[in-house]
Image (spheres, rainbow, N blue to C red):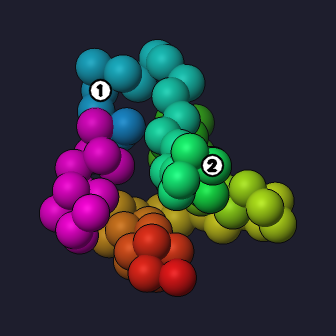
Amino acid sequence: MNQQEVKNILMNLQNKQYIESDITHTFSENNTAVFSVKYLKNDQTFEVIQIETNSLQRFDNVDSAVHCINNLIAK
């Protein structure tokens, strides 16, 4: 998955069409969930959770969240 595809996913989560919904996108490898991302409309932040460690990071802009996700994909 390239950087633009990740950015498109995040932009869709942030889309006003879905703003009243609570949508989480989960990234998996070999049918095992690795991390997830969701947009928190009240805080206007993206939340990235590494599932194995349950560590959470929040980002207030798309580009920072994309950078984090690309790093997780590259692992």
Residue 7 location (% of width, % of height):
26, 58
Q: Is residue 64 left or right of residue 42?
A: left
Question: Which secondary structure dominates the residues rendered in magenta?
Answer: helix
Q: Amino acid at mark 1?
A: Lys
Q: Which residues are magenta?
A: 1-12
36 or 31, nearer to the observer = 31
Is residue 14 among the parts visible in the rendering? yes
**Point 53% across, 53% down: residue:** 30
Is residue 45 among the parts visible in the rendering? no
Residue 27 location (% of width, % of height):
50, 51
SS at badge 1: helix
As displayed, is residue 72 above or below residue 30?
Answer: below
The stretch drawn in magenta includes residue 18: no
Q: Residues within 10 Å of mark 1 (few under 14, many from 20)?
A: few
As displayed, is residue 36 above or below residue 53?
Answer: above
Q: Is residue 27 left or right of residue 52?
A: left
**Point 52% across, 57% down: residue:** 29
As displayed, is residue 50 above or below residue 72?
Answer: above
Q: Earlier in the sequence, mark 1 or mark 2?
A: 1
19 or 55, nearer to the observer = 55
Query: How many labels sit on residues?
Result: 2
As displayed, is residue 11 above or below residue 73?
Answer: above
Q: Residues within 10 Å of mark 2 (few under 14, many from 20)?
A: few
Q: Which residue is mark 1?
A: 16
Quarter occupied by the N terminus: bottom left
Q: Which residue is mark 2?
A: 33
Front position among marks 1 and 2: 2
Q: Amino acid at mark 2?
A: Ala
The disc label shown at residue 8, or none: none
